[in-house]
Amino acid sequence: MTTPASIAAELAETTRRQAAAADPLASCWVSANAGTGKTHVLTMRVLRLLLAGTPPERILCLTFTKAAAAEMSKRVFESLAKWVMLSDADLGETLSKFLDRKPTPEEMLLARTLFTCATETPGGLGIVTIHAFAERLLQRFPLEAGVTPGFSILDDTTAKKLMRDAIDHVIGAAARDTKSTLGRALEAAIAYAADDHFDDILTDAVNRRDWLESVARLPSETEGGPEGLEIAEMLYRRHFGVRAGITRAAIEAEAAAVLSASELAHIRDVLRAGTKSDCDLADLAAAAISAGSDTHRMTALCGLLLTKNHEPRKRLITKALSAKNPEVEPLMSRAQSRLLSFVAECQGAVAVEATMALIRLADAVRQRYHNAKVRRAALDFDDLIQRAQNLLANSSSVEWVLYKLDRGLDHILVDESQDTSPSQWRVVEAIAGEFFSGTGAREDVVRTLFAVGDEKQSIYSFQGAAPEMFSAMGDRFASLTESAGATWQRIPLTLSFRTVAPVLDAVDRVFADTARTPGVTPAPHVAQRAGHAGLVELWETEQYEEAEPADAWSPLEDKTAEPPVVRLANRIADTIQGWIATGETLVSTSRPITPGDILILVQKRNPFAAPMVQALKARGIPVAGADRMRLTEQIAVQDMLSLGDFLTLPEDDLALAEVLKSPIFGLDDADLEALACGRKGTLWKALLDASRDVSRFVEAAETLKRWRKAADFRPPFEFF
């Protein structure tokens, strides 16, 4: 049981560990749970490095996002600015707490100059994302990296457009020439596409660039041998147990021949003399005999000899019938064994055929997308990491690049390291490896590596991160530092300042079973908020239900099943309504729950957010509503768009009708009928004619005339 004394002891231990992690003389690998002060530790370490005399330009801190980099910079500069302004006594007291010892006069003097020093450093303090660092690296060594000097970076919108254009071009070319390699690949891939998700599958395959390029570069065992894609197909066939060169049609033909027509006829006749289950199998034997193709015959044989899951039928014939016809069961058993092997091989052939079709299409898209970037002399974010990795690992000038980098870096810090992908780790490893090789360009200073992360979060695979990478890279860097005789520390941070004990206990229980979370061995949480209430509930999931169709002669009685997302939203809304109606006590404050105490978190806004808001409003429960909206879906904006359509094209009768019925003018259906019915020209001409005689049309006509004149001379923003 957690007690105030145990929390105090844990807090003291956490403070000690944070100080150890900030030690500028040691390389550290920090495994930190969420809410344990990762950003605080990073900030402390940067400040300790600066106080130890490290020039700002020799510190590189790699973060996961721009927001994280900005937050770190903000914290560092706030501390440095505070040190400048404090009196000598206050500064001495602050630094004593920070260093856990009395500062030296030199440290006192240095602390007052660090803000100016960090601000005036060319390029600023090195707190950047991994992509920003890779961009700087390539800009510094463009020729060595094989990129165009002065290259540009594609923003997400442009990159998506170029990718979309590449996909459309490849699919179009394949559809026009069905006899080409791409045409055959498209025909094969579409045959296996699930509903309308083919585009998503192709896009996902194209985004796996490392996989596609590694497939394309597979080496041949002999000079002039097969190319990468052909080698990949050979490897896939070997993996799935599919014979070289055989087609799915050939496998189906072999499967269809496991029983001859005469054998099937004999089996059919014997089974028809048995029980109902025998007769059902006899019908399948008859279907196999009359099948018009190998595919249909194989399907009928699978029904006869195998279960729906393509497993062997345990009973092929009843005992009484088998006793009278002892030759039938062995015959069916032998056929069953052969059919099983053909079914497995056929399934493997399907997997190989679909996979290779997708690879060929995706590789063609990747190549066209690459060519589009080359024409623009541009790189996307994945290119930055890949080119930086190649520069530091494969370039013939790598020694020169690392030598130049080595002279400029003494300390590397990696934030959110659980989200660092293998390719990004290789960039970090190439740089940090020089720190401990003994051949670095600067041997007169202590060089360190620091990484902090929560390995549990790597299960989400951000940027392609893998759970096992965090631990593996920790072992790798431990080996490097220890072999160089440098100080290495593994430091766990487990005291959470953010969350209550019941929630943390639930997380620990999830990760306690390593079989379910392979590669993750996190330390258990300790809650600093002792005694605070909390509860974790698991609700039964809502399953999709088929609605019973109404009688064909009573279509109005047909009902649609309520979607699972709506049922779940109603359950949550009913629960909240019950809390409020019964005055459920909020334990943390000892008062009844109010709607403002409740926060509903969703994994994605769609499709849950809208039904949830609707369910709460239907019960009269105040709700803030969705935190984002599409402007073009708002009716007021739609009215403005209709107005723009009319002003651009006065002949657009529908747009004008929408504008007239909108709150801008407030005409009703009767007014529109009076204008529209029997008119000989456009609705706009009818409105102008009617405004001469009918007063209620005058304002609309005169206003629209004035707006039409203004629209010709004003840009859209100023006009609206």
Image (tube, rainbow, N blue to C red):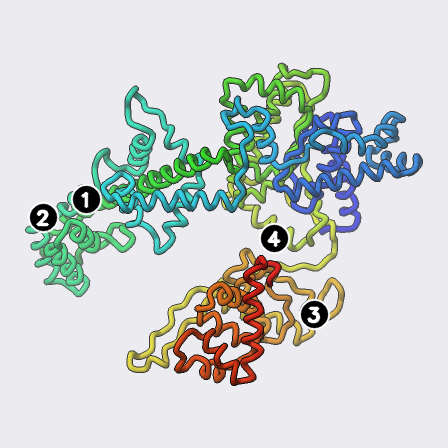
Q: Residue at x 8, y 51 (%)?
A: 261
Cα–Cα span, label 3 and label 1: 66 Å
- Mark 3 vs mark 2, CA separation in Å: 76 Å
Q: Secondary structure at mark 4?
A: helix
Q: Amino acid at mark 4?
A: Ala
Secondary structure of the residue carrying tag 2 is: loop
Q: Counting other residues with Cα less than 10 Å from the Cα at mark 1, is it few (<14), some (14-19), or many (20 or more)? A: few
Q: Which residue is mark 1?
A: 249
First in sequence: mark 3 vs mark 2: 2
Work out whether mark 1 precedes mark 4 in sequence or the reverse, and give the earlier one: 1
Is residue 683 or residue 246 the one in the foreground? 683
The answer to which of marks 3 and 1 sits earlier in the sequence is 1
Q: How many marks?
A: 4
Q: Amino acid at mark 2?
A: Ser
Q: Residue furthest left?
A: 262
Q: Are marks 3 and 2 in contact (CB under 8 Å)?
A: no
- At 71% across and 51% down in the image, what residue appears? 1
Q: Nearer the viewer, residue 502 or 247?
A: 247
**Cα distance, mark 1 to mark 4?**
52 Å
| Residue of label 2 | 260
Which quadrant, please, contains the C terminus? Answer: bottom right
Return the residue at label 4. Answer: 506
Q: Residue at x 62, y 73 (%)?
A: 577
Residue placed under numbered mark 3 in the picture: 594
The disc, 2 or 1, on the residue closer to the chain's N-terminal end is: 1
Instruction: Indicate the secondary structure of the residue bearing disc 1.
Output: helix
Amino acid identity at mark 3: Thr
Residues at badges 3 and 1 in contact (C-beta under 8 Å)? no
Specify which label sits upstream in the sequence, 3 or 4: 4
* Front of the two marks 2 and 1: 1
State the image quarter where residue 204 is shown: top left
